[in-house]
Amino acid sequence: MNRLKEKYKSQVVPALSKHFGYKNLHQVPKLVKIVVSMGVGEATQNKAFLDSAVKDMQQITGRKPLITKASKSISNFKLRQGMPIGCKVTLRDEVMYEFYDRLISITIPRIRDFRGIKTSSFDGRGNFSFGLKDQTVFPEIEYDKIDAIRGMNITIVTTAHTDEECHQLLKELGMPFTRAE
C-alpha cells in the first residue's frame, strides 16, 4: 500500500473526524481523482509540439495521455473544430496517491521562489485546481531533451462538499499552502 494512502487511513481520517465531528467513516472526504492537463496552442501550426507534450506528460504521469480536441472553431486563432490542441491524464486509485505523493514531496519543493500554493483556487464543491508554469520541475523530465517550456493544470477532485473540508483534507495530506492561512 502506498505510504500516502496509509497516512490517510491512519492519521487524516481521525483528524478530519475530530475537526468536523463526523460520526460515520464514509462522511470523511477522500481523494477521487487527479486530472493533469496541458494545453498546446502551438499544435495548430505544428503537430510536433503536441507529440513532445504527450511524451512529457507520459513521462510525468506514467500513463498515456488522451489528446484533447477543440470543441468549436475560432478563426482569430486559426483553430477549427476537432483540431488537437492539448492532452490530459486522469489518475485514480494507487496511481493517484503515488502521483500526489511525488507532487508534494519532490516536485513542488523544486519550484523556484516557491512561497506556497494559494488557496484561492477552490471551486466551492470540494475540488482544487492549480497550475505549474513549467514541466521541468518534475524530476522525470530531462532539461536537455525538451523543446519548449510548457505549463500544466492539476485538478484534485475530492468527495468534500465544501471548500473548508477540501482545504483541511489537502492540508492534512501535506499540500504546502501559503502561510497567510
Image (cartoon, rainbow, N blue to C red):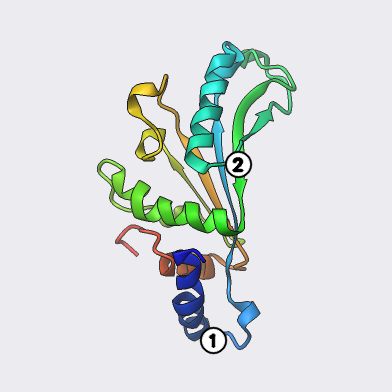
Q: Quadrant of the C terminus?
A: bottom left
Which residue is at a point 38% across and 22% down the rendered structure image? 145
Crowdedness of circle 2 by 10 Å Cα count: few (<14), some, many (20+)?
many
- Picture residue at 58% right of the left edge, 11% below the top: 45
Closer to the chain start, of discs 1 and 2, is 1
Mark 1 nearby-residue class (10 Å; few <14, some 14–19, many ≥20): few
Task: Say which residue appears at 61% left-offset and 36% top-offset.
Answer: 64
Q: Label 2 is placed on what type of residue?
A: Val
**Whether residue 81 is situated above or below residue 60 in the rendered picture:** above
Percent position (x, y) of residue 106? 34, 50
Q: Which residue position holds label 2?
A: 89
Secondary element type, mark 1: loop
Relative to 91, 2 lies left or right: left
Task: Residue 87 in the image: state x and y as whole percent.
Answer: 60, 32
In which quarter of the view is residue 71 placed? top right
Q: Position of residue 70 (x, y in %)?
A: 69, 26
- Residue 133's tag is none
Q: What residue sits 53% from the left and 64% below the top?
A: 163
- Please provide percent x and percent y for residue 157: 59, 57
Q: Nearer the viewer, residue 160 or 146?
A: 146
What residue occupies the far left of the structure in this picture?
113
Q: Nearer the viewer, mark 1 or mark 2?
A: 2
Residue type at the position of mark 1: Gly
Location of residue 173 with respect to 73 vertically, above or below: below
- Contact check, label 1 and label 2, Cβ < 8 Å: no
Q: Is residue 145 shown to the viewer in this render?
A: yes
- According to the picture, the residue beneath numbered tag 1 turns out to be 21
Outermost residue to the front:
1
Q: CA distance from mark 1 to mark 2?
A: 35 Å
* Vertical side of 9 occupied by 106: above or below: above
Residue 134 in view in this figure? no
